[in-house]
Image (tube, helix red, strand yellow):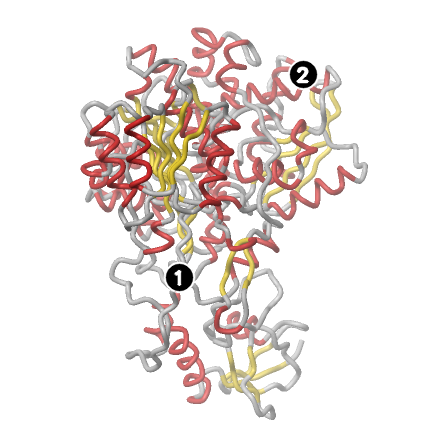
Amino acid sequence: MPGITIDDHAIEARDGETILSAARRHGFEVPTLCHMEGLPPTGACRLCVVEVEGMSGLVPSCSHPVAEGMKIRSRSPRVLEARRTVVQLLLADHPDDCLYCHRSSNCELRSLSAELGVDQRLYRGPRSTGEKDVSSPSLQRDPDKCILCGRCVRVCEEVQGVAAIDFIKRGSATMIGTAFDRGLNVSSCVNCGQCVLACPTGALTERFQVDEVLAAIADPERFVVVQHAPAVSVTLAEEFGVKPGTDVDGRMVAALRRVGFDRVFDTSFAADLTILEEGSELVHRIRNGGVLPMFTSCSPGWIKFVETFYPEFIPNLSTCKSPQQMLGALIKTFFAEQQGLDPAKIVSVSIMPCTAKKFEAGRGELGRGGLPDVDYALTTRELGALLRRCGIKLAAIEPDAADTPFGGRTTAGKLFGASGGVMEAAIRSVHFLLTGRELGKPRIQALRGTKPRKELSLEVGGLKLGVAVVSGLASARAVLEEIRAGRADLHFVEVMSCPGGCVGGGGQPIGLNHEAVQARIKALYNIDRDETVNVSHANTEVQRLYGEYLGRPLGRRSHELLHTHYERRDVLR
Amino acid sequence: MTDNNRQVLVVDDDPDCRDQVAIIIQGAGYEVISAASQAEAEELLLRHQPRLAVLDLMMEEMDSGFVLCHTIKKLYPELPVILLTGVTAATGMSFKSQDPRGRRWIEADIMLDKPVRIEELRGAMARLLKD
């Protein structure tokens, strides 16, 4: 292990690690804008420069490996001045709209300006005048706020395997753009929103719909219903400065009521319903020579990914709608009938950890008579904004329970928020469907955690099952390529577009924060550990729904309301 | 207006956009009459009563599409209007027909930002025409 000194402190570095890595591990905070944990360095932003004795120029610490005896200065006057100059140059053409920029409270450029003592705009270049791209139903881009750090490009290509955006043009005209610079809406973007999490400034955001939701609530003619996804309750508190992994389910339900929603439902109920439909579909496919492996269909980024890049695998996708859309369909049919409401007067809102859910809600095939099943899909961040706008203090509210008939959930439905959760819940219920008995050990450790790929072979009720769980679309692409090349031992594959699953979704609090994702997952596992009803088929509200309305899984009504189809997608790429 | 009226008015000063929109609408089984400006559209509306209007916003004037919406709703209050616009890209200003401020004065039933996807425009048409 090489011994080095940083600012005269002797430390032991690890073989092959970078100066940045060694420095940060020992408490020397070195600023960066382009560095991304877990990806190879690019050395593009030059903010992380340090002085190394014996070297004439400043060295980018993110890409320079340590060596025995290296003497490093991480905060010499020369280093600090160089960093300040980098930020001052970035500010030269940056807009002055911090007062109303959506990222003003968590903008990395703004923080760095403060940290590095930038107190004036020293250089004044002509303002960037790129065209805003607001064409996508999920995401919007403002190139004027882009500092060309490249993090969005890297996450899109290297983590998600999509490459919808890249550097285009040259020199001072360089910008981030889509193919032919024609807008995200007609590009290969799958709307996952990982670029939003990666963006240090306000150049990338979701398409905001808080105003529309508040307008609907204020309209006495409208009956406004909200559902919240499994990952949201273990994340929302972070929007209010509470540590990651804190579950605020009951408080969130009470807060949504205070906002003025007429009913508050839990998407985890529909996750339980999904398990019964999807589990039955899997068994049906295996027993009847259907197309295998079957892929899960809850993640709308993944669905668009298959439609765009691998249309030959469309028959492998489960025909089940996502839980958001299943619940949306039931709200405007079963619930509307039960309550004597005109479906056209119901406004169905969802709170999702996801930006692709906005796109999904607008898919034409998911609705009836021109009416969408879900009218507005807000992100976890937008829910934070909504509560702040309404002056609702989450910490001061007494918890409350969600409404019937779609408020009851099991812990299996809640696990949908974590990568591997759908698979674990499905195995528990498929075992019951096939044997009539509960699985002895319901918690399947091999499928848990944030690893991008997890695989398992098991026997369930006499059926041999090869299962895989992947999160992050680049990992999904690798599995698809293996299957394309002839791999035939898999029967069921769970794919979540975002690393770690929905808890790491593009609609979650800003930042690619692996520790936060792990804490949120742990909170979901704790719920599964602490509560008693942990299999979807034991959800009494789901049982009642089948008894009173749907009949049976894969039945006529289920087919009509809970299943869908997909189509090959032509995009500019 | 008769039930079998399949005529859709398309107004856009950009011939590429106009043609693309026309092709999408024709592909959905409708007949297209088109105009390249607010003035041309107003003249067409004296002779035709289409079932749907799909309008660009910025044409001979920055607000031509908004004005045309008002004219249409005055002449034919039941005629649904879709406004297709690149106004935010061009000016940075954002307009929404569905938020409380927009609802007060934007007469379009649906506003979509350019470029639109084929299924997105067809979905908007389906919502308004209920065919």
Identify the residue shown where x is 44% and y is 29%.
B32
- SS of the residue under disc 1: loop
Q: Which mark is residue A284?
A: 2
Q: Which mark is residue A201?
A: 1
Q: Residues within 10 Å of mark 2 (few under 14, many from 20)?
A: few
Identify the residue shown where x is 38% and y is 58%.
A202
Please state which amino acid type lies under the numbered disc 1.
Answer: Thr
Q: The N terminus of chain A lies in which quarter of the figure? A: bottom right
Q: In this rendering, is residue A243 above or below A539?
A: below
Query: Residue A383 lies in what quarter of the image?
Result: top left
Q: Dot 2 falls on which chain?
A: A
Task: Find the distance from the CA under tag 1 to the CA under tag 2.
Answer: 48 Å
Q: Which mark is residue A365?
A: none
From the top left corner, tell me how far across and down residue B118 is, in percent: 50, 35
Residue A528 visible to an observer of this rendering:
no
Query: Residue B40 lies in what quarter of the image?
Result: top left
Q: What is the residue that sits farthest to the right in this orientation? A: A486
* Mark earlier in primary sequence (1, 2): 1
Q: Dot 1 falls on which chain?
A: A
